[in-house]
């Protein structure tokens, strides 16, 4: 019987990095070294040229330069591991332009929308995480859980980063917010808050990316968390499990992770790793090895939270290919796909709520139920909602309305917080002409 999606097992492969002129002589030992990967990250156009040689034409670099000057909210930082998953069939200008991983890691100006590159309601800290800080870097948004941002750097910077307000270096377009406390003071403030608030049971330890926290500091932070009886879930957020898997298989990191996992198990705490993979091509045998190693040393689960993006993965085949590769080949649970947040210059990536609902519909029934990801919309002032939970939806103007059942840390004295409806906006180019006309009028009036 023919089905809309035909599953075929596909084994993971490590594309041959010597196809890149800049890495012609790189050995397997160098490739598997976290140190080599970090030193050889691509941070600017000159370094990208050194890797790609003349395989990619000048028009691409001009396009990239324009993007960096006029649109990009993130500075450039791409580990060789990630570049090697781009243009896997052969490096040409066309293949590089079309590549789904390139489209979000190395965005160019021609990717962006000419009209409505930004939504009028987009903002730098679109989820108001900073407003909800209860200590520097500690966001208390949901009743029982917190997000702990330990630092503001990552081993890789993603074009669509929702924390573009804080994460990475400033760009010509965005002057970044700076963490002010010394790391040890910040960590102490988090631990003090958590000790004083026993109703918080779940900590997402994030950043940035925890792979950039020196291991001994991260271990000491995690052990302090584990010493608090009321903390029952700890999730380590690291895209580097995919972007720099070499980090997670270094002996000192593996040994440290084992000590933390053993303590978590003894105390009955669920310790998990959450990573961020957006395309099946990003999964290589080294990524699978990093996930397997974490599980072997006692981490309870490795889960994926991807981001739904046009041009990258926003079609049911790409999502299912990715989920089967995660679940079947890499031992990573496909858990969530977030809709891309309403940050500036992200409209070419974002999808409308109705498109996300359709995608959720189209991926049901293929994967085991527990491994079928939920597609969620992170609604400002609300939090994650499954895309079918929308309360009301004005399709013409692309405005969806959502409700919630808890207060965030900034709504203590707002008597209407639980009865209000909260708005989320579809990208304007996905609206019917009448809706687009309405937004043009609004914009002119403003
Ligand atoms: S790894 Fe996460 S925090 Fe870092 S740039 Fe990417 S999306 Fe942002």
Image (cartoon, helix red, strand yellow):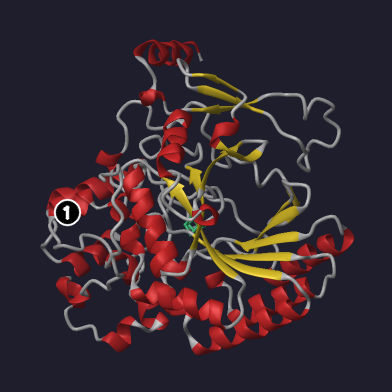
For this view, does 141 lie left or right of residue 344? right
Residue at 21 percent of width and 49 percent of height = 98
Q: Relative to residue 419, is residue 328 drawn left or right?
A: left
Residue 139 lies, with reference to residue 11, above or below; the image says: above
Up-down: is 153 above or below 38? Answer: above
Measured along the vertical axis of the image, is residue 164 above or below residue 56?
A: above
Please say whether residue 104 is visible from this viewpoint: no
Against 326, residue 286 (above or below) is below
Query: Callout 1 environment at 10 Å: few (<14), some (14 to 19), or many (20+)?
Result: some
Nearest the viewer among 246 and 283 is 283
Residue 231 visible in the current orientation: yes
Q: Which type of secondary structure does the marked residue at label 1 adopt?
A: helix
Give the x, y percent position of residue 135: 76, 56
Number of numbered discs overlaid on the protein picture: 1
Q: Is mark 1 within 8 Å of ligand 1?
A: no
Asked where in the image residue 225 lies, by quadrant, the reply is bottom right
Give x and y (percent) for residue 380: 62, 36
Q: Residue at x 12, y 57 (%)?
A: 92
Residue where numbered disc 1 is placed: 95
Given residues 5 and 58, the one toward you in this image is: 5
The spot of residue 320 in percent (x, y) is 37, 51
Q: Quadrant of residue 50?
A: bottom left
Percent position of residue 136, x then y: 72, 57
Quarter of the figure with residue 260: bottom right
Q: Is residue 134 left or right of residue 318?
A: right
- Could you tell whether 249 is left or right of 184 in the image? left
Q: Residue at x 76, y 73 (%)?
A: 268
**Along the viewing direction, whichever of 185 and 349 lies nearer the viewer:** 349
């Amino acid at each position: 019987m023919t089905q809309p999606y035909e599953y075929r097992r596909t084994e993971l492969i490590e594309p041959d990095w010597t196809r890149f002129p800049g890495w012609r002589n790189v050995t397997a030992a160098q490739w598997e070294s976290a140190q080599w990967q970090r030193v050889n990250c691509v941070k600017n156009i000159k370094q990208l040229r050194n890797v790609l040689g003349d395989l990619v034409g000048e028009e691409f670099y001009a396009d990239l330069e324009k993007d960096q000057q006029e649109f990009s909210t993130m500075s450039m930082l791409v580990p060789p591991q990630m570049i090697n998953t781009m243009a896997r069939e052969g490096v040409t200008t066309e293949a590089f332009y079309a590549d789904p991983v390139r489209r979000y890691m190395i965005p160019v100006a021609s990717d962006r929308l000419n009209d409505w590159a930004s939504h009028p309601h987009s903002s730098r800290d679109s989820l108001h995480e900073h407003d909800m800080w209860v200590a520097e870097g500690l966001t208390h948004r949901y009743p029982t859980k917190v997000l702990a941002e330990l630092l503001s750097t990552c081993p890789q910077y993603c074009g669509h980063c929702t924390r573009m307000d804080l994460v990475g270096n400033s760009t010509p377009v965005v002057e970044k917010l700076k963490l002010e406390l010394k790391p040890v003071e910040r960590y102490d403030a988090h631990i003090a808050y958590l000790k004083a608030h026993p109703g918080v049971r779940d900590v997402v330890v994030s950043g940035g990316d925890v792979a950039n926290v020196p291991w001994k500091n991260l271990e000491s932070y995690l052990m302090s968390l584990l010493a608090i009886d009321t903390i029952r879930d700890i999730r380590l957020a690291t895209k580097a499990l995919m972007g720099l898997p070499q980090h997670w298989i270094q002996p000192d990191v593996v040994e440290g992770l084992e000590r933390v996992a053993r303590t978590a198990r003894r105390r009955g705490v669920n310790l998990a790793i959450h990573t961020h993979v957006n395309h099946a091509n990003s999964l290589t045998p080294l990524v699978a090895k990093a996930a397997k190693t974490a599980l072997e040393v006692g981490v309870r689960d490795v889960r994926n939270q991807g981001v739904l993006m046009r041009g990258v993965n926003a079609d049911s085949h790409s999502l299912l290919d990715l989920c089967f590769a995660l679940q079947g080949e890499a031992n990573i649970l496909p858990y969530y796909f977030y809709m891309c947040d309403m940050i500036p210059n992200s409209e070419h990536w974002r999808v409308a709520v109705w498109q996300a609902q359709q995608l959720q519909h189209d991926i049901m029934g293929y994967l085991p139920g527990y491994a079928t990801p939920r597609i969620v919309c992170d609604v400002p002032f609300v939090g994650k909602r499954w895309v079918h939970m929308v309360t009301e939806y004005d399709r013409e103007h692309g405005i969806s309305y959502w409700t919630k059942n808890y207060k965030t840390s900034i709504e203590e004295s707002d008597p209407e917080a639980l009865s209000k409806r909260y708005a989320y906006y579809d990208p304007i180019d996905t609206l019917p002409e009448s809706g687009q006309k309405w937004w043009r009028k609004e914009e002119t009036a403003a």
